[in-house]
Amino acid sequence: KNQVEQSPQSLIILEGKNCTLQCNYTVSPFSNLRWYKQDTGRGPVSLTIMTFSENTKSNGRYTATLDADTKQSSLHITASQLSDSASYICVVRPSEGGADGLTFGKGTHLIIQP
Amino acid sequence: DGGITQSPKYLFRKEGQNVTLSCEQNLNHDAMYWYRQDPGQGLRLIYYSQIVNDFQKGDIAEGYSVSREKKESFPLTVTSAQKNPTAFYLCASSIADGHGYTFGSGTRLTVV
């Protein structure tokens, strides 16, 4: 069964600090891997999308990396801001299968303290 | 602005009552999806539709029903057969099956 495991489950850091969130997956072969940001009580918003051939993708202070050999991805947040407090979800889409093949991680709950 | 709109934002259901959650998109996306989100769990697929007048069950379809009479609309009905409906419901749409996703802002359903 395809799985996406995220760590840590929750994280608290001080404003201005950097942090890295991890995503390990078993989906293979896969079409793309996505990171979403979900504010409390809101829908997820896409941060990055990477295909299996891409190693890194940036979106402002967010940088995602992908190692397809070890089936690991990370999301690095630089110079954190209070508005970064949210859940971050890793989603993997396999190469085969339709919408029901998408596998969602449980997310990392990030809290930025002033 | 193009987007996907869910309503209402909050919904309360009495025991034995059916309720319908609305999802409308003006992105001209072919595919639409309904997910359920519970605390500490990943999103789980309820139903999805790749084309008008056609839809498929997801992982947790029992106790739910959908319709897709228009490309723009994909309402979800939570029936009395769903014994634990309290959750956050998310609607999404995409250009093609699984390619690119846009989520709505969600509906929080509570049983009272």
Image (cartoon, coloured by chain):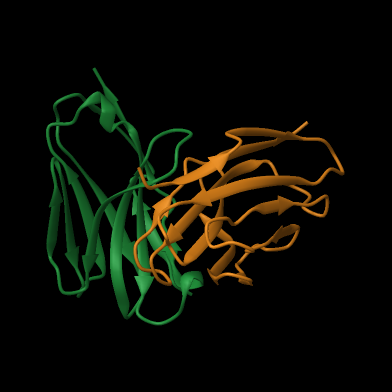
**Residue at horizontal 66%, vertical 53%?**
B76
Q: Colour of chain A?
A: green
Apparent side of residue B111 relative to residue B4 in the rendered image (left or right): right
Judging by colour alone, the chain drawn in orange in this rendered image is B
Q: Residue B1: where, in percent of width, then height?
A: 35, 42
Q: How many numbered marks does the figure carry?
A: 0
Give the vertical position of A86 relative to A72 (above or below).
Answer: above
- Is residue B56 among the parts visible in the rendering? yes
Q: Quadrant of residue A43?
A: top left
Give the vertical position of B8 relative to B82 (above or below).
Answer: above
Q: Residue B40: where, in percent of width, then height?
A: 51, 45
Q: Residue B112: where, in percent of width, then height?
A: 78, 31
- Is residue B39 among the parts visible in the rendering? no
Q: Residue B73: where, in percent of width, then height?
A: 57, 55
Q: Residue furthest right?
A: B16
Q: Quadrant of residue B107?
A: top right
Apparent side of residue A34 relative to residue B80 in the rendered image (left or right): left
**Residue at horizontal 19%, vertical 24%?**
A15
Nearest to the observer: residue A95 or residue B5: B5
Q: Quadrant of residue B62?
A: bottom right
Q: Residue furthest top?
A: A114
Give the vertical position of A11 relative to A52 (above or below).
Answer: above
**Residue at horizontal 24%, vertical 64%?**
A72
Q: Which quadrant, please, contains the C terminus of chain A?
A: top left
